[in-house]
Image (spheres, grey):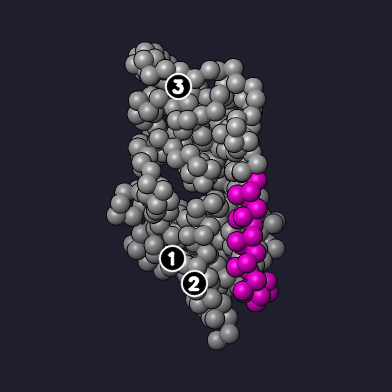
Amino acid sequence: MNATLGRRRLRALGAAIAATAIGLSGCGTASTTETAPDSQGGDAFPVTIESALGTAEIPQRPERIVTLGQGSAETAIALGQAPVGIESYEWGSDDTGYLPWIHEAVTAEGGQLPTQFTGGEDIDFEAIVELAPDVILAPWSGITQEQFDILNDIAPTVAYPGKAWSTDWDEQIKIIGKALGRTADADELITGIEQRFAEAAATRPRYADVTFSYIYTNGPGTLGVFLPDEQRVAMVSKLGLTVDPVVQTLPETEGTDSALIGLEQADKLRDSDLVFTFYANPETKKEIEAQPLYKSIPAVERGSVVASADNSFVTASSIINPLTVPWVIDRYLPEIDAAIAKLDR
């Protein structure tokens, strides 16, 4: 979206926002001057949250939540507040049209599934206006400054604190907890996740002696390596495996939380016992695996690769939050065990 289009859309949205406000006024409004914790021990409002793109001024406890990017919807649900709208993610959704752990969590509580809308580069701003959100959560996303400015005109918008798609998983939960007035509950969620990982790692003591790298490709000739704090790498690490030390030496490529090193440097991964990766589709997998340099990576050559063909699993194992972790762990361990078994052959 160019600047002129952005301004035009913003003006149109301003009119839509005003119309929405008029339509909602008959339903009554809550006070915007709350300053004391609620009766259930929540935080006081108003709340101010700074981000790399701007400030979110949240005047009162949000009731209507919209989420963009990944992971925020799950944390809001775990905190007892299912969003009214979420960015759709068709690649990881199941036959319900939703990410399965979101569908399961909401329906198990008898709740109403959130409305899904287009996100990414072409956010459906009009759909978000119609949802009349009190807050928009996007702390792990790739929204641009121009998108943020439009969103923040619709409702207080919480973006990422540093770089796009680079927020640590626990920081994301803390940010959402603050935005929803549930910081203590958010801390408990983090503790619960850490405990779940520790319990799983305790069942696999051998993992501590196994190194890994988590790689991806953007097509023939390309090779990227996710960095240690990236959420999918952090998940594997918390299950007990050790990130290949070479990963620490790779320079970050801006905005990716990874290093795009190119397939010509595939030899850098020669000491990785396991390789974790994913493919967009079977055709891409066949194309990538046919490349001689790719096949020469020792872990690939011996088959010590963890690469699920289940898009829902790939998505869930890429995000650390209160819903994905329990959904992933029991599915992940057998796949990792099978890859490690190849080391003994």
**Is 250 included in the stretch rendered in magenta?**
no
Q: Along the line of sight, which residue is nearer the eye, 119 or 66?
A: 66
How far apart marks 3 and 2 lie (CA) works out to 44 Å
Q: Quadrant of the C terminus?
A: bottom right
Q: Give the residue type at disc 3.
A: Ile
Q: Position of residue 261 (x, y in %)?
A: 58, 55
- What residue did someone put label 2 on? 335
Q: Is residue 103 left or right of residue 331?
A: left
Q: Choose the circle earlier in sequence order: 3 or 1.
A: 3
- Label 2 environment density (alpha carbons within 10 Å; few <14, some 14–19, many ≥20): some
Marks 2 & 1, CB-CB < 8 Å contact: yes
**Is 198 included in the stretch rendered in magenta?**
yes
Q: Choose the circle earlier in sequence order: 3 or 2.
A: 3
Q: Give the residue type at disc 2.
A: Glu
Residue 150 numbered tag = none
| Secondary structure category for the residue under label 3 | helix
- What residue did someone put label 1 on? 308
Q: Residue at x 62, y 25 (%)?
A: 45
Which residues are drawn in magenta? 186-213
- What residue did someone put label 3 on? 154
In this rendering, the answer to whether 338 lies above or below 263 is below
User: Looking at the image, which residue sits at the far front?
Assistant: 39
